[in-house]
Amino acid sequence: MADSSVKKMEDLSYDDNDEVALVAAATDPAVDDHPGRRSKNSTLQLQDAEKSEAQINGQMVLSLLDKIIGVVDQIQQTQNGLEARQESMEKSVSTIQGELSKLSKNHLGTAGTVNKMLDKVRKVSVNVKTVRNNLEKQAGQIKKLESNESELLKRRNFKVLIYQTTEVQSHPV
């Protein structure tokens, strides 16, 4: 039946050497001991050989188709996985964009608040400078008064003036 040089389909792995061996086995003519005459056995053997070669070729085609289907299924699974990852990444990106938008709005609000606070700090600073200048003037005036008082006390020649203020109140009669 089948030549022993032909391998089972499960044992086949695609290789150029295997292809050459299969092609050679398929194209080599069957060896006939009596080339001039054909017996029933040789005709049956040829038919069986042709059937077995056809079966082997059919099995090889089926095996290759199975491998192709397996590869295509694997590619589809990989593609589905990539699509799922793409969708997940798109959702993550849109979430990040939303968070960045919120952060930007919060930043604008914070910037406005900081600007208002800085304006208030500037106003307070101006007021503090004004108060400080007034205090320094008053301190200078107090020093002059103290020096004048000490000068007067040294001379012992001073007069005290007392003023009395009266308020006129009208009482209802």
Image (cartoon, helix red, strand yellow):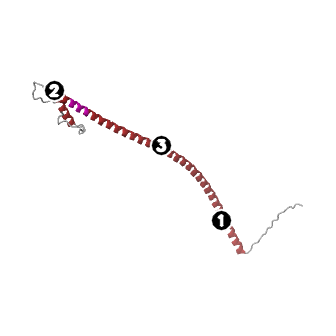
Task: Indicate which label's residue lies in the foreground, 2 or 3.
Answer: 2
Q: Earlier in the sequence, mark 1 or mark 2?
A: 2
Q: Earlier in the sequence, mark 2 or mark 3?
A: 2
Main secondary structure along the magenta-highlighted residues: helix
Q: Is residue 78 left or right of residue 132?
A: left
- Quick one: quadrant of the C terminus? bottom right
Asked which secondary structure carries label 2, the reply is helix
- Characterize the local packing of mark 3: few (<14), some (14-19) or many (20 or more) Cα atoms within 10 angstroms: few
Question: In this picture, which residue range is highlighted in magenta?
Answer: 51-59
- Identify the amino acid type marked 1: Ala
Asked which secondary structure carries label 3, the reply is helix
- Characterize the local packing of mark 1: few (<14), some (14-19) or many (20 or more) Cα atoms within 10 angstroms: few
Q: Residue 157, percent across and down?
A: 74, 74
Up the image or down, 11 lies above or below 162; here it is above
CB contact under 8 Å: marks 1 and 2: no
User: Which residue carries the number 2 mark?
Assistant: 43
In the picture, the disc for residue 94 is 3
Disc count in the image? 3
Residue 2 occupies quadrant? top left
